[in-house]
Image: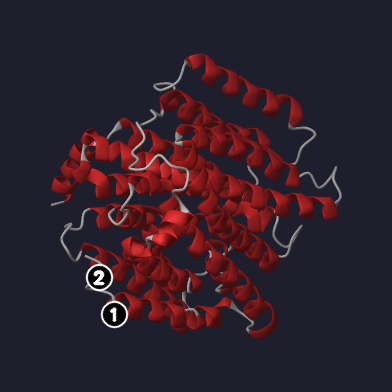
Amino acid sequence: MFIRYINKFVFQIRRIHTNVIVIGILGFLTNFSASIVHTTAVLFIGDTIISSNLLILIRNFSEAFANFYKIFGGIISDYCKKRKLFLVIGYVGVVFCKTMVTVVTLKKYIPISIIVYIYVINQFIDRCINAIRDPARDAIILETVKNTDPEFVNISFGIRKFITSLGSVFGGIFTFLLLWIIEYKFSIQFIYFVLFIPIFIMSIFIGKYLKKMYINIFVFFYLFLIKYLSKYLELSTIIYSTAIVPVVLATLLVVKKIQEVKKYTNNSSSDLSFKYIFKNYKEFKNIFIIINILIFSSFGRICDLGIFKRGLELGISSYKIPLMFVVLYISVALFSYFLSCIKDDQNYVFKTIFFCLSSLLLGNIILYKYTNFITFWIGLILISGYLSLTDGVMSSIISRYIPNEGLTATVFGLTYGFTGLFLMLNGVFTFILRKYIFTSFQNIHGVMCVPILIAILILIYFRKELV
């Protein structure tokens, strides 16, 4: 049976358009980079520069703000009738933000007060750049697949999320091994050698898509950084500098390999967007139902740093945070592919969303009721089922209800936006609960069950509408 699923997966990969695969690889590279930063943030930044609770609030708030800002990213993308341009802007911005995160580690040379401001501003810039990129990314996937193989819409979004999540998995494994090496005090030369390994592997792999000249430039730049600057910089700075290289490769890849798709539009007027949506709101009824479900369910979700903090409360070493990251995103990758393979019948939307909401609810209940290591890992895996919905399969669900193809990016941005508004409130609410009411994240997981139950009730009530 396992071999049969592998063969099916390979067959699907071969049929999927190059744009989808390349966008998946872009996500792999950026997630590999992000996992290095996020899994070490509590260790290198939290409690030494910024308190962990504030770090979680900043992360949650900036992510929520960016999701709300995606509304405007989608509108602008549809208005300009461009997709690739916004992808390029997004990835160039990510390079800038990863560079600024490296600056945060320069405690020897920059006052702590300034570092805090840099970190906060950088988090918001990073999330807002994603807001520019993501609606255009989802739109280019949908337009590409509709133009070549319409029956592969679900699987294309699922495969994109699957490949992207693998970046977090391998990034987490790499960071876990790196922190293990640091903890056991291996020589600094050996640590630098380990840091170079993923850069070397990526250079070989990406060399199939880009000119080797570009690859050699960045490899030599990295070697120069290690050899001549390491004596002046802390190890955390060198590690974060390593995280810049994959996003630079991703930027080159999007410039060279993403193909612009002829714009789908039923109306070339710039009056499309919000004016059209609210004037013809009945056409978007199903989308607004799904948005309401996402609003309540996002209010019942604690960000990944908060979940990792719960692991630390149970006694898991901070050096094992990357291992939590690996387990979380292996599960996200597998759930994403599984959800995209569910039979696409009239109950597909209900079955998919109900499964993901139930998974999130059960994960929160387990993290609230039980306090041992085994149940923590089970809860972590269950929560990943919901994450596979929000950034992957949900886009394919929303795409089936878009009545005007000239509004593709706008509708994706609208979905992200309203969800982000309540995710922002969720971040503030979580911060207040943790700081002033509860002494741990355990009770917060219990409180989060209430909005998830409301989301499930909304889904059940409108079940017949979502066909």
* Amino acid type at image mark 1: Tyr
Pointer 1 and pointer 2: residues touching (CB < 8 Å)?
no
* Mark count: 2
Residue beneath the point at 38% across and 28% down: 259
Which residue is tagged 2? 465
Compared with residue 45, is residue 227 higher up or lower down, i.e. above or below?
above
The x, y position of residue 418, in whole percent, is 50, 63
The x, y position of residue 175, in whole percent, is 54, 47
The x, y position of residue 318, in whole percent, is 60, 61
Residue beneath the point at 68% across and 45% down: 101
- Cα separation, mark 1 vs mark 2, equals 9 Å
Left/right of residue 289 with respect to residue 311 in the rendered view: left
Left/right of residue 230 with respect to residue 457 in the rendered view: right
Query: Local crowd at mark 1 within 10 Å, few (<14), some, or many (≥20)?
Result: few
Residue beneath the point at 46% across and 70% down: 295
Which residue is tagged 1? 461
The x, y position of residue 187, in whole percent, is 66, 38
* Amino acid type at image mark 2: Glu
Q: Give the quadrant of residue 27.
A: top left
Compared with residue 183, is residue 229 higher up or lower down, i.e. above or below?
above
Compared with residue 50, is residue 125 higher up or lower down, i.e. above or below?
above
Residue 334 seen in render? no
Residue 368 seen in render? yes
Residue beneath the point at 59% across and 66% down: 424
Under circle 1, the secondary element is: helix
Query: Local crowd at mark 2 within 10 Å, few (<14), some, or many (≥20)?
Result: few
Compared with residue 263, is residue 8 higher up or lower down, i.e. above or below?
below
Under circle 2, the secondary element is: loop
